[in-house]
Image (tube, rainbow, N blue to C red):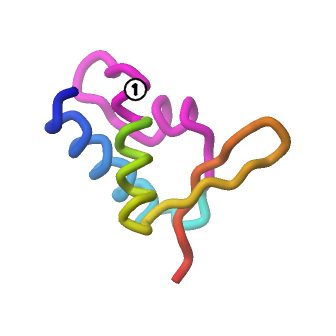
């Protein structure tokens, strides 16, 4: 997987949450609405990898709501 694309997605997610810190969304919503892809949207696999890394860094957390998983910023 292209590290540049993962880093790009991580930066976009961070920028989105800096402007809207209380936001939460699914993988699909984040992929579609939070990341401003320069051309055609990359695979959701790129977004999933970015979310996983941001979770490992303690920036994001997963919250299960029913059968859906929402991602949100970790409040300090």
Looking at the picture, tell me which residue is in the foreground, 50 or 16.
Answer: 50
Q: Is residue 44 above or below residue 75?
A: above
Identify residue for label 1.
Answer: 45
The residue positioned 40% from the left and 35% from the top of the image is 47
| Residue 67 position in % (x across, y down) | 80, 36
Query: Outermost residue, top direction?
Result: 40
| In this picture, residue 24 sits left or right of residue 20 | right
Query: Outermost residue, bottom direction?
Result: 76
The residue positioned 42% from the left and 47% from the top of the image is 52
| In this picture, residue 61 sits left or right of residue 17 | right
The residue positioned 30% from the left and 16% from the top of the image is 40
Q: Quadrant of residue 22?
A: bottom right
| Residue 41 position in % (x across, y down) | 34, 21
The residue positioned 36% from the left and 58% from the top of the image is 14
Looking at the picture, tell me which residue is in the foreground, 17 or 55.
Answer: 55
Q: Is residue 60 above or below residue 50?
A: below
Q: Is residue 41 magenta?
A: yes
| Residue 45 position in % (x across, y down) | 40, 26
In the image, the segment drawn in magenta is 24-47
Query: Outermost residue, front direction?
Result: 56
In what element is the residue under mark 1?
helix
Quarter in which the N terminus is drawn: top left
| Residue 4 position in % (x across, y down) | 14, 37
| In this picture, residue 47 sits left or right of residue 60 | left
Q: Quadrant of residue 42?
A: top left
């Amino acid at each position: 997987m292209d590290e540049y694309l993962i880093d790009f997605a991580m930066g976009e997610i961070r920028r989105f949450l800096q402007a809207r810190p209380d936001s939460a969304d699914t993988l699909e919503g984040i992929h579609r609405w939070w990341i401003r892809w320069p051309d055609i949207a990359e695979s959701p696999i790129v977004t999933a990898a970015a979310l996983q890394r941001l979770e490992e860094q303690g920036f994001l957390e997963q919250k299960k709501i029913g059968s859906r998983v929402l991602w949100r910023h970790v409040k300090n």
